[in-house]
Image (spheres, helix red, strand yellow):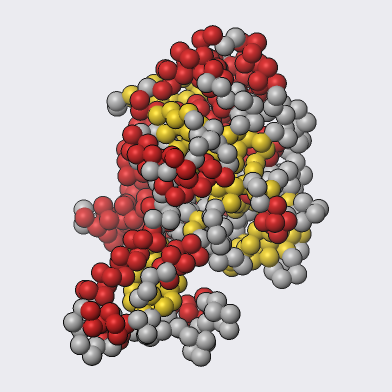
């Protein structure tokens, strides 16, 4: 095992310019290239590099005309759609900074992100988003401009900017340097409110250049394209957006993951980026369809053959019998799976949560190779990634070109390179805790580096949960709210690697008798009442209150009341009343499992 590993940069760190330069270069070099495709009914309508640049400039002029100054922050709260990408570049062209907000964010979260960042305006997708924003708008006096996509604001901004000259707009663009802040992305902390990760143009330019030219088979292949359905508010989706624009990859957007397969069939991408949950759903859907058609055993045999074939590729190659079986199932099963994903997909990029070897081998076995990577918001997305020329299923790959990793004495994985953020917005103490003076970033994860430089994540140093869909969830925010209820003694939010967030709840032994009397439960004890509808309704009310502090994706979907309390004497609580999560998981693991059964 190694303690440190790095890969030389393919593209040097930029010393001038900004992310806006990419769309200007594209328009100059390949003006007629179909840079983006926008859904119009059942068809995809192309937007050329030249058209995209002109539209970005027109919207940027509108932003300038509305009084936004260089360096000021503008929020963007929307599902994944063309307009998100459009205003992202327009905000930068106007010299401003974009602040992504998940469209599922609660009013409280919106208020915090926009007020903490000092945003002067916000783009909202719909009247539904505006209704949520209006709940707290009076608490964000700095936001004096509210633009709603569905209200035709893009055309209005273009009209507003007609009096702004090209020269004035170029003066705005000239204010940007690699050191300029590009975006502030708020990410869940282990305690307290979300922290704003400050990422510069240099961070993203270095990241996307070394990803694009480090994975040329994916991004630079002729005719490459992808359908982006992950939230652009997430750093993973954002980085892929920027990489596609940089590389000239045809980029489409889809806001509805439920319509993913029909979208893939019509768009026909050459690669896909997703969190592991999506690959699991693709696999499960195919399996369930096979069972419904009476072909469940055939599918299961084909799936195992794909896994065996992929594993054999790492062990000297498949034998004749396995090759013949694989060839047969390729015609009967695998080709249909590839067709369901559009027919042209060769690669997939996975991040946000651990993929698992089984899925990695299955998809490689059907000739769709998943390149798993690893990174955080603070690292501009990926710091390590498997590449077509350096692939090890079960790992998160080697450092991307220009990045470096090392394992600290306590096993924590440290990350370095010019993709590392410059700090947390308005939070110097958190910055000092996360960033060493020499630039190394504390990932909060426990990892190891093998002799060839491939990284494996073996545990979590932080308490941050990552769901199967790649959503980061800080349990403390929910737990603090839950414990505020008089009936609740202790609680533990769970969901790491699971499809949704859930919780174990214990009842306050001192409060329970009063509740039992109020609800005519006689001399009932807590163990007698764990399934009682009235007690569960009371806890549900506490859960609903806690969920107000977080987005829908972070909210507690299920809970279980336990018949015992957690105490210092029982070993589940420290003398300072902190929860020993590992102890609780060990003692109540079966209860956690029951929440997902």
Number of labelled discs?
Answer: 0
259 to 549, vertically: above or below: above
Q: Quadrant of residue 555?
A: bottom left
Residue 215, given in percent of the width and then of the height, sits at: 62, 40
View extreme (left): residue: 520
Can I make out residue 337 in this image?
A: yes
431 on left or right of 391: right
Instruction: Name the residue at 42% across, 69% down.
Output: 484
38 or 423, nearer to the observer:
423
393 to 260, vertically: above or below: below
194 on left or right of 380: left
351 to 535, vertically: above or below: above
Quadrant of the drawing holding the C terminus = bottom left
468 to 208, vertically: above or below: below
208 or 364, nearer to the observer:
208
Residue 480, given in percent of the width and then of the height, sits at: 47, 67
Quadrant of the drawing holding the N terminus = bottom right
Residue 531, given in percent of the width and then of the height, sits at: 25, 78
Instruction: Name the residue at 77% across, 44% down.
Output: 8
259 or 294, nearer to the observer:
259
Residue 213, given in percent of the width and then of the height, sits at: 66, 35
Instruction: Name the residue at 69% across, 27% down.
Output: 176
């Amino acid at each position: 095992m190694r303690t440190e590993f790095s890969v030389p940069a393919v593209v040097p760190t930029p010393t001038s310019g900004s992310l806006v330069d990419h769309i200007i270069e594209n328009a100059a070099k390949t003006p007629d290239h179909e840079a983006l495709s926008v859904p119009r009914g059942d068809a995809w309508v192309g937007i050329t590099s030249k058209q995209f640049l002109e539209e970005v400039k027109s919207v940027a002029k509108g932003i300038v005309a509305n009084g936004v100054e260089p360096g000021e922050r503008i929020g963007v709260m929307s599902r994944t759609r063309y307009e998100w990408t459009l205003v992202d570049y327009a905000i930068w062209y106007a010299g401003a900074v974009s602040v992504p907000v998940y469209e599922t964010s609660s009013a409280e979260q919106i208020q915090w992100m926009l007020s903490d960042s000092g945003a002067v305006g916000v783009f909202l997708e719909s009247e539904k988003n505006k209704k949520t924003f209006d709940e707290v708008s009076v608490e964000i006096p700095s936001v004096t401009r509210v633009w709603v996509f569905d209200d035709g604001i893009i055309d209005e901004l273009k009209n507003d900017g007609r009096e702004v000259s090209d020269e004035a707009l170029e003066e705005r663009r000239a204010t940007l340097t690699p050191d300029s802040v590009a975006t502030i992305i708020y990410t869940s902390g282990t305690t307290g409110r979300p922290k704003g990760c400050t990422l510069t143009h240099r961070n993203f330019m270095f990241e996307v250049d070394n990803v694009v030219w480090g994975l040329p088979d994916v991004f630079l292949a002729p005719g490459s394209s992808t359908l982006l359905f992950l939230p652009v508010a997430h750093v993973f989706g954002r980085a892929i957006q920027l990489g596609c624009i940089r590389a000239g990859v045809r980029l489409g957007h889809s806001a509805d993951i439920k319509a993913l397969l029909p979208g893939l069939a019509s768009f026909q991408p050459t690669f896909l980026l997703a969190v592991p949950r999506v690959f699991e759903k693709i696999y499960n859907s195919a399996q369930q369809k096979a069972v419904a058609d009476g072909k469940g055993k055939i599918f299961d045999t084909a799936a195992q053959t794909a896994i065996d074939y992929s594993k054999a590729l790492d062990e000297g190659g498949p034998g004749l019998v396995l090759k013949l079986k694989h060839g047969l199932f390729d015609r009967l099963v695998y080709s249909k799976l590839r067709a369901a994903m559009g027919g042209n997909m060769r690669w997939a990029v996975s991040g946000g949560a651990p993929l698992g070897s089984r899925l990695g081998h299955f998809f490689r076995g059907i000739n769709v190779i998943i390149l798993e990577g690893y990174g955080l918001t603070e690292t501009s997305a990926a710091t390590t990634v498997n590449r077509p020329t350096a692939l090890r299923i079960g790992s998160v790959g080697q450092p991307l070109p220009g990045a470096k990793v090392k394992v600290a004495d306590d096993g924590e994985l440290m990350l370095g390179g010019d993709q590392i953020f410059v700090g947390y917005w308005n939070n110097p103490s958190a910055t000092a805790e996360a960033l060493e003076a020499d630039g190394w970033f504390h990932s909060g994860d426990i990892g190891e580096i093998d002799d060839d430089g491939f990284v494996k994540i073996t545990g979590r140093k932080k308490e941050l949960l990552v769901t199967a869909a790649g959503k980061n969830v800080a349990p403390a925010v929910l737990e603090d709210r839950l414990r505020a209820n008089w009936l609740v003694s202790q609680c533990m939010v769970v969901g790491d690697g699971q499809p949704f967030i859930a919780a174990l709840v214990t009842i306050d032994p001192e409060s329970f008798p009063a509740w039992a009397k109020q609800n005519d439960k006689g001399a009932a004890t807590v163990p007698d009442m764990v399934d009682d509808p009235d007690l569960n309704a009371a806890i549900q009310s506490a859960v609903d209150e806690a969920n107000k502090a977080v987005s829908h994706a972070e909210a507690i979907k299920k809970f279980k009341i336990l018949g015992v309390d957690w105490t210092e004497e029982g070993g589940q609580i420290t003398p300072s009343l902190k929860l020993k999560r590992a102890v609780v998981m060990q003692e109540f693991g079966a209860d956690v499992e029951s929440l997902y059964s």
